[in-house]
Amino acid sequence: MISIKKENNSIVFRFFNIKLTIKNKNYFSKIFTPIAIKFKLFNVKKKNYKYIVPMGVNCTYSLKFRKHYDFVESYMFNYADIRNQDKYIEALYDIDNIFPNNFEFYEPRTMWLNTKYDILFHGRSAEKDLMDENGNHIEDKVKKDFEELVERMKYLLQKTKDTFNTKEKKLFVYCYQNIKDEETANFSQKLYKYLSEKSENFDFLIIICSYKTFPDINKMQEDYENVYVRQVFPQTEDYDWAKTMEEFAPEILKGNDGKKLKCD
């Protein structure tokens, strides 16, 4: 008798009296996922959107989307690192004034930190591009990196607001990573409330990257017909990500845009 199932944080294979346990590994998911994509083996009802807007917590969703579809649309928070959820909600209500005030260069990650809302944003430059031969940051290049970020964010701010205002069907996505017990539906409810105030005709996808399940977040699917919660388990993450991408899909595939993404 052969069986495959999940037990706690492991995948357990049984072949008659032989038991094989693989802990916290994604090996079989990596092997099976390309096959599942090619032959459409995902058992999902596909939902298509003209606009798909990442809302945080960091760049993971955008990178996974680009890997799956070979393109990605950029909005204001695609590659931001949101470090304080309460301050993030405050920032959304003050979205027109996030830039260019209250910023400082965050050297450990070559990013720009908004000190008021505790959000990190990526500039265009790699760390080596901002340094001299002695490993010191060149002030003029650092300054130009921030100027480029401010100009880019002006464009992405307007693009984000225009997308919020359109009456066409759209998807907003929030991805929980390293989720703690206290990070419950409270924040998701606040974010959903903001989206409901600022937009219409949308779905809200919450992705939880964790072994644990969070019943209070899952309950939002029952409370709101336009909220979906999906889980990405570390031991099957390749398959789980691909399945989620197949279910919540762009209306139009745009092909490779040739851009290189900078994210850490």
Image: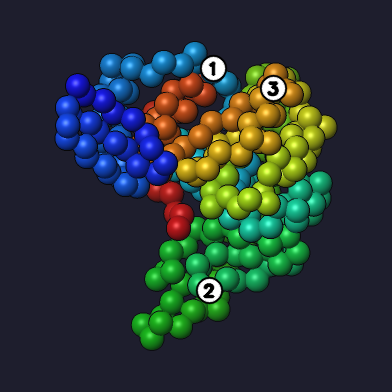
Q: Nearer the viewer, mark 3 or mark 1?
A: 3
Query: Which quarter of the picture shows residue 220?
Result: top right
How packed mark 2 is, by other alpha carbons closer than 10 Å (few <14, some 14-19, many 20 or more), is few
57 up-or-down from 73: above or below: below
- Sequence-wise, which precedes: disc 2 or disc 1? 1
Is there any visible trace of residue 64 in the rendered image?
no
Q: Compare marks 3 and 1 and give the one earlier in the sequence.
A: 1
> Type of residue at label 1?
Lys
Quick one: label 3 or label 2, which is nearer the N terminus?
2
Q: Quadrant of the N terminus?
A: top left
Q: Quadrant of residue 112?
A: bottom right
Q: Amino acid at mark 3?
A: Glu
Q: Which of the labelled discs sits on residue 47, or is there none?
A: 1
Q: Secondary structure at mark 3?
A: helix
Give the distance between the C-alpha atoms of the residues marked 2 and 1, in whole angstroms. Answer: 41 Å
Q: Using the image as rendered, state which of residue 212 and residue 42 is in the foreground.
A: 212
- On the image, the x and y values in percent for residue 17 come to 17, 32
